Image: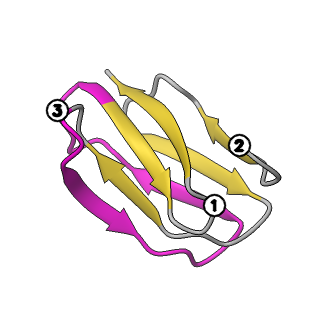
Amino acid sequence: MDKNNILIFPNPCHDEVMIVADIETDVDILNIQGQGIRTIPANALQMPVQVGDLVPGIYFLRFKNTDGLAKLIVH
């Protein structure tokens, strides 16, 4: 993603995903249709994100400060 490094693991995931970035950035979780599910405010360079309440499927993570986008699979 451009100049910013963002790591997401594990992917696919079940209950929790860890986002590690070189800058603090808010993260939007979007469904496959591009609709916003929730926003996770940036509070650290390493953020555990709970996804156990999401319906299994494909989601996208949009990183607001970088205009980056990543695919997340929840099973």
Q: Amino acid at mark 1?
A: Thr
- Lower sequence index among marks 1 and 3: 3
Can residue 52 be found in the magenta stretch?
yes
Task: Decide: is 62 above or below 27.
Answer: above
What residue sits 61% from the left and 51% below the top? Answer: 19
Secondary structure under the numbered disc 2 in the rendered image: loop
Task: Decide: is 14 above or below 67.
Answer: above
Horizontal side of residue 23 vs 59, given as left or right: right
What residue sits 24% from the left and 42% below the top? Answer: 34
Q: Are marks 1 and 2 in contact (CB under 8 Å)?
A: yes
Q: Amino acid at mark 3?
A: Val
Indicate the position of residue 35 as horizontal and vertical percent values: 18, 49
Please provide the residue range marked out in magenta.
33-58
What residue sits 74% from the left and 68% below the top? Answer: 23
Task: Decide: is 49 above or below 15.
Answer: below
Q: Nearer the viewer, mark 1 or mark 3?
A: 1
Q: Quadrant of the C terminus?
A: top left
Horizontal side of residue 29 vs 72, given as left or right: left
Secondary structure under the numbered disc 1 in the rendered image: loop
Horizontal side of residue 12 vs 20, given as left or right: left
Q: Which residue is mark 1?
A: 66
- Lower sequence index among marks 1 and 2: 2
Q: Which residue is mark 3?
A: 55
What residue sits 62% from the left and 39% below the top? Answer: 8
Indicate the position of residue 25 as horizontal and vertical percent values: 59, 69
Indicate the position of residue 46 as horizontal and vertical percent values: 68, 61
Horizontal side of residue 51 vs 69, given as left or right: left
